[in-house]
Amino acid sequence: MLPFMIGDRVPEDDAVWQLLMALKDVVELVMAPVHTDETLGYMESKISEHRYRFLDVFPQETLKPKHHFLEHYPELTTSFGPLVALWTMRFEAKHRFFKRIVRQTGSFRNILRTMARKHQTMIAYHLHDADAQRPMLTVSKMTQVAVEVLKDSIRESFARKFPRTEVVNMTDKVTILGTSYCVGMLLPFGSTGGLPDFGEILQIIILHESPVFVLRLLGGWYHEHLRSFKVEPTGEIEVILHSELKDAYPLAAYNTADGRMVSLKHFICTSD
């Protein structure tokens, strides 16, 4: 969000801003769920760029151990896979459960036994809960609609993909494996010239218990200063299954002084 909030007020050659944007590039690469040899080389170059810019902007500072640990990220990714699968956020969430017990109990007498018993009670509750197994697909409200009443552009695109379907169920929001998708969100669904293509969700259709997204295609141009993409409608409509998405993480678009912008949550590998 920071590039959208103040980016237009910062000169493009500002050294501190370039350092911050280099760090943004590194974070997106580290959080990427898929990597190739090319993206690992790109990560290594971005880490080196960040180190160089840091020493250039803050010559009186010395590199911290974390800067050194960062140098090993490409090698660790090669050995163990994407590092986002190894981060400690789930451990922090587990730790929060025990910290809450300590605060609420207000007693430290045999606190380890108290935490163990409450944790086992919680686990037993979830194991015996009939709804503990979260369904893959969750829809709060659906409306049955005949395909023939859809807008012409949507009906034509849908008929090309599902020619013998006459009635569909439509919804404004769907949750798939814990990830929520709403009308108005953006989805990266392909790539052109090494850059991701985006589509805005116009409608969500549930067909044979599978989600289908009706997307308004958006042309994207990379904005180097904001490390984001400027998007504009192309006038085309695309119908795509959730299983066909190359990256299933939904994004939001923001209106800025430079137009409608979208920032990635992680680097998207566009090579096959």
Image: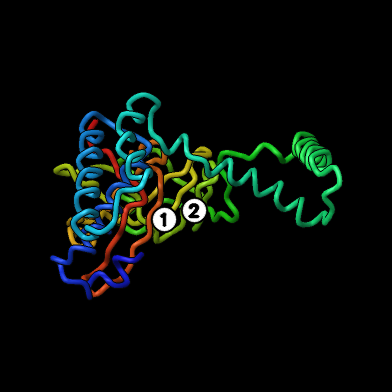
What amino acid is at disc 2? Met
Residue highlighted by disc 2: 170
Q: The residue tagged with tag 2: helix, strand or loop? A: strand
Side of 29 relative to 99 (left or right): left
Quadrant of res 39: top left
Q: Residue at x 27, y 50 (%)?
A: 25
x, y percentage for residue 161? 33, 39
Side of 40 relative to 209 (left or right): left
x, y percentage for residue 253? 34, 63
Q: The residue tagged with tag 1: helix, strand or loop? A: strand
Crowding near the residue tagged with mark 1, few <14, some 14–19, many ≥20 C-alpha atoms within 10 Å: some
For residue 226, the mark is none
What amino acid is at disc 1? Gln
x, y percentage for residue 76? 36, 29
Residue highlighted by disc 1: 203
Q: Residue at x 47, y 43 (%)?
A: 211
Residue nearest the viewer, comparing 244 with 42: 42
Asked whether residue 263 is in view, the answer is yes
Its colouring scheme is rainbow
- Decide which of tag 1 and tag 2 comes sooner along the chain: 2
Q: Residue at x 36, y 51 (%)?
A: 265
Q: How many marks?
A: 2
Label 1 to label 2: alpha-carbon separation: 7 Å
Q: Quadrant of the N terminus?
A: bottom left
Disc 1 + disc 2, Cβ < 8 Å: yes
